[in-house]
Image (spheres, rainbow, N blue to C red):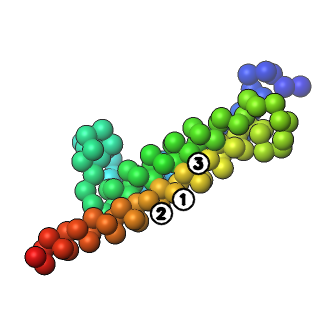
Amino acid sequence: MHIIGLRFVTETFHFSMLLAATAILPGLFFLGINFSSWIRVFFQNGAEIGSESIVFITSLCSIIGAWLGAFPIPLDWDRPWQVWPVSCVLGNLIGYSAGLVIGTIHMYIKYNKIRKLKIT
C-alpha cells in the first residue's frame, strides 16, 4: 500500500542525486566552498576562462535539460519513458553532455581570441 505523497520518493531521491552530481558537484570540486566565488561565477557572470566557465555552462545546461525533460510527462501517450523521472533524467544527462560540448567550443574560441591578441 502506497501513501499518495510517498509514492515516488526513491525515484525523486535518485533524480535529485543525479541533478546534484551534474549541477553542484563539479562546482564544489573547482570552486570549493568559497561562497564569494560561487556568487561571482553564477550570479555576476564573472566566470574566468577555464574550469570556471565549464562549471557554469555544464551546471546551467544540466538544469535546463532536466527542466525541459519534464515537458513530455503530462502528455497522455502512456509510454514507459514518460514515467517520473525518466524524461527528466534523460534531459539532465543530455543537457550535461551538451554543456560539455558547448563549454569545450566556448573555451576553444576564447583561447584562440586570446592567442591572436597576444600574437598581433
In three-dimensional space, the C-alpha distance between marks 2 and 1, rounded to whole angstroms, equals 6 Å
The reply to whether callout 2 and callout 1 are in contact (CB within 8 Å) is yes
Q: Furthest residue to the left?
A: 120
Q: Find the residue positioned furthest to the top.
A: 4
- Amino acid carrying mark 2 in the image: Val
| Residue at x 59% of width, y 48% of height | 92
Image location (x, y in percent) of residue 95: 54, 51
> How far is mark 1 from mark 3, CA to CA?
9 Å
Determine crowd level at label 3: few under 14, some 14-19, many 20+ residues with C-alpha closer than 10 A: many
**What amino acid type should be assigned to the residue bearing mark 3?**
Asn
On the rendered image, what quadrant is the N terminus found in? top right
Residue sitting at 47 percent across and 56 percent down?
A: 99
* 115 sits left or right of 96 in the view: left
Q: Is residue 24 visible?
A: no
Q: Secondary structure at mark 2?
A: helix
In the depicted view, which residue is nearer to us: 10 or 89?
89
Residue 97 got which mark?
A: 1
Q: Quadrant of residue 114?
A: bottom left
- Among all residues in the image, which is located at the extreme bottom? 119
**Is 117 displayed left or right of 58 in the figure?**
left
In percent of width and height, residue 78 lies at 85, 36
Instruction: From this view, report whether residue 73 is shown above or below residue 55.
Output: above
Alpha carbon distance from label 2 to label 3:
14 Å
Residue type at the position of mark 1: Ser
In the picture of the structure, the residue carrying the numbered disc 3 is: 92
Q: Residues within 10 Å of mark 2 (few under 14, many from 20)?
A: some
Which residue is depicted at the point 31% across and 63% down?
50
Q: Are marks 2 and 3 in contact (CB under 8 Å)?
A: no
Residue furthest front in the image: 120
Residue assigned mark 2:
101
